[in-house]
Image: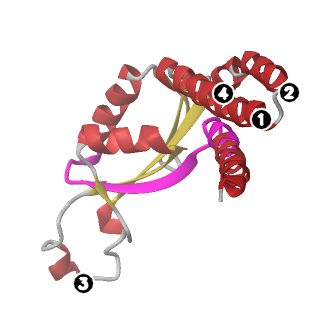
Amino acid sequence: MESLVLPSTFFLTVLSLIGLFFFIRASIKDRTTLMRFTSKQDEATLMNALKSYFQSRAYRVISIDANKNQVTFQGFVRPSWFLAIFLTLLAIIGILCLSLIVSIEFPSLGKIFLLLLLLSPLSGILYWRNSGKLEQVLLKMENNNNIYSNIPNNQLSEQPSSSIITLIGHRDELLELQKTLQLHSFDG
């Protein structure tokens, strides 16, 4: 029974390290997505709220296309100290576990695997270098009346007057925008 404990622990540790590798790689992955929201505010009020929101988040307007009713914002997304330290700690723990198992099975190689601990800060450095970048948010505003164009005019006044915002940008930024401005998801 004891003969199976070490190989199975080694196998599980290697699987955990593979998961750790993909977790570190996913931390720098591009998360650009398209989301659509509705708001009961009129276009002018909503556009001012969106502009002030993006300015407060250090974004600036880089282009305006009046024909398409689109605005493009650009800002620098800073990496998170917490996540850089967290990834480094996870790498230290993962390599330490692997070193412990190897040192039990092969005592002469255990010290060599402990030297791999010196590589663990590379995970935090990799995250830090690749996650801090310029991000763009493309905003397109539509009036909700365009959606109800096939409804007769006498029933159109019964429909709520609202604006539809289509955004393409970093997923976390768009979710924060939704929460801050209390926007509703639009599935139409």
User: Is residue 40 magenta-colored?
Assistant: yes
Amino acid marked by disc 2: Leu
Give the mark nearest the N terminus, 3 or 1.
1
Residue 92, image x, y percentages: 63, 24
Disc 2 crowd, CA 10 A, few/some/many (<14, 14-19, 20+): few
**Which residue in the rendered view is the most extreme toward the left?**
158
The residue labelled by disc 3 is 152
Task: Give the numbered dot on residue 102.
Answer: 1
Structural distance between the alpha carbons of marks 3 and 2: 79 Å
Numbered disc 4: secondary structure: helix
Q: Tell me whether circle 3 and circle 4 mark residues in contact (CB < 8 Å).
A: no
Q: Quadrant of the N terminus?
A: bottom right
- Real-space Cα distance between discs 2 and 4? 13 Å
| Callout 2–callout 1 Cβ contact below 8 Å | yes
The residue located at (75%, 21%) in the rendering is 114
The amino acid type of the residue labelled 4 equals: Leu
Q: Earlier in the sequence, mark 3 or mark 2?
A: 2
Question: From the image, which quarter does the C terminus lie in?
Answer: bottom left
Span of residues in magenta: 21-45
Report the number of numbered marks: 4
At label 1, the amino acid type is Val
The dot on residue 109 is 2
